[in-house]
Amino acid sequence: MLKHLIIRLVLITVAFMHEPLAADSAPAGSTSQQNPYLNFLNIWGGNSLKIVFNLSTMTIEATAESGDFSNVNDNFSFMVIDQGSGEAVVQADADSLEVTQFVPKINGAGFSYGNVVALNINPQSGLKNPTLFSNDSSGPTDCIGQNQYFAITSDGLTPYTPQFQVQPVAILGAGTVNNAVISGTAPANSKMSALVNGKMFSGTVNSSGDFSIAVTDDDGFTATTPIVINWGAFSKTVTPSLLPQNNLPQETVTGYHYMLNAGLDYLTTPFPNEIVYATSLLTPDAVTAWDLVYRILLAYNNTANSYPRDSQGNVELYVDYASKGISITAEEAEMVQKYLVRNCPRLFHLKDWPATPKLTGSTVVGQTFYIGNSAQDGDEYAEQLLQTEPSASYLLSLIQPDMSIYQIIQVIQINYEHMVTYSFDNDNSDIRGALFSHTAICGGYSKGFEYLMQRLGIETIWVEGHADGQLHAWNFVDVFRNWYLSDTTWGGKNWFLDGADSIFTEGHVVEQVYSQMPVLARESVPWGIGDPGQTVANLTGVVNYSDNDNGSVTITYEDAANINTSMQINLSSNGYTPLSMTNSGGLWSITVPWRSGEQDSIATDAPVTTLDFYFTVNDQFFTSGDVQKHNLQVAVLSDGMNNVVLTIPAN
């Protein structure tokens, strides 16, 4: 593995060291080294190669004595690199057995002060101390198996560190993983690459100097695998580190909170930002019952084997409502049972059986729930829940801090689909199949996706019905009060937040999972709106407007965190030509002429009755696609919105 991660190295075996080639004669009365040089020995330990940097002529003077480098080719790399561009101005390999054939490649080449010399020698060569003579001193270099850099100055060759930074690469799990994200800083708008296990991955530095490279390797890598990061001819070798084992809180600038490597305490309580659709369909008393049962089931542990069992060995777990002052009907008790199974994917140990309420008159005073599904004994439930965490945390770790909700959903969906294989194995109809064994049927796919979205605070439900005439399960996802269909079992971009207009959605016939099913948005969200290269406006503040007496309208966006450096508004009344907004303490605003019923500047006949608009943020974030065709508009909301066209009604 390592041999693929080392670039242009030398194979030299050094038996013992001899005196180096004589140094250049110093000027009379001076003890300073006139010209810096590098000296190498051949496989027999004798002088082999001397590379002098003549500071008078600013050229390289290379000389060689007899002797081979080694008995293989491509064993030595020498470069002179322009520090500003990162590109090599001199680059040569020792690609023959005779050193004398290498010398003409670099002899006479020019250089400038500020250029950087890069050396790299194959560690199998046996060459232990190629020596640098500079600044009236000498010492071994550290270029065995890696690039070592020296800046050429008027005082000689001095150690140099490439001017790009690589953030620590953290991976989840102590074993082999298949994915990582390499990020850091480098000169703006330049190109970066990462070499791992002989495979090259590329990325581009943005205008702010930040880069991110996604590395995916089916063969896998570990915390000891070298990863070579390249900017131009410069490179750095890093090895991943393991993330802390428990509870690593994450937050994005777009307001999403989630936990990586969550411990059992986190996984066995309701998530802090969890949105459960089913609770919106229950009465206040039923919601109280729901919450009580939910917490009891999440904390389930039968190590003491203290619960009664039915004839099939399933645990009978009775919850007393009366002692908690909870009063619900038998119908509500049935909904609590049914919705816990369908909207709480962590409760894979709960049997999907009808409610067994205990009644006093028509009032339910308690309810029996049944625990089974190979998780009723001891702490099996907790152990199995923890087993899903490495995969869940890996998928969540792919989220970058500046991602919009659409990018978050897309990166989770793509990688989740790649992680899971359709199969009729055990436990494949719940999150254990999707996130532990990585084999699932449609029920497991949709349960796992529901779980991942709930970890992020994105409202998602599990839906069952028929697709293409077959029993099937999938998801509905709520994105800023618009519901979309997502089918991770079938996968691909056709299932990215589909609306009612999609020909694929038409083939999904929904059964009445809930007393009231969400209505899908009229039109789908474009797949490209989630592409990293198509970053879209991520608005998390409050958008508002006010009509003015003079017929104008003032539109504001409250950027409470003041994270945006520029904002423009794009109005339907002027063909969506962007207009700059002004910022006062994080409140962006603009006043534009607007009278309903006036002729639209781009229309040919019909008068304007509404004013549609969307935002451009920081000159690079925008609402993707034809806004009218894709119909991303929603009613004006009193709280945050994201990537939407807003509609102001006639004034």
Image (spheres, grey):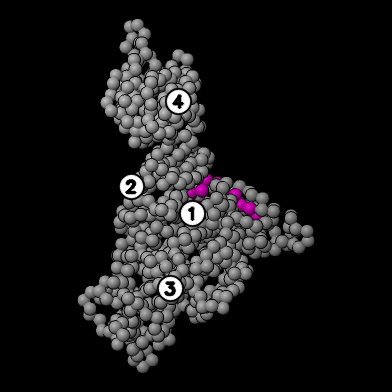
Under mark 2, the amino acid is Thr
* Amino acid type of the residue tagged 1 in the rendering: Met
Q: Position of residue 460 (x, y in %)?
A: 47, 69
Q: Position of residue 284 (x, y in %)?
A: 41, 78
Packing grade of label 1 (10 A; few <14, some 14-19, many >=20) is many
Disc 4 versus disc 1: nearer the observer: 4
Q: From the image, give the main secondary structure of the stretch colored magenta.
A: loop
Residue drawn at (29%, 77%) of the image: 376
Q: CA distance from mark 3 to mark 2?
A: 36 Å
Quadrant assignment, res 609: bottom right
Q: Earlier in the sequence, mark 3 or mark 1?
A: 1
Residue 563 inside the magenta-drawn segment: yes
Residue behind mark 2: 224
Judge whether residue 560 is colored magenta: yes
Q: Nearer the viewer, mark 1 or mark 2?
A: 2
Question: Which of these two is toward me, 279 or 261?
Answer: 261
Residue at 59% from the left image edge and 55% from the top image edge: 623
> Does the residue at mark 3 contact the one at mark 1 (Cβ under 8 Å)?
no
Badge 3 is on which residue? 424
Q: Secondary structure at mark 4?
A: loop
Give the mark nearest the N terminus, 4 or 3: 4
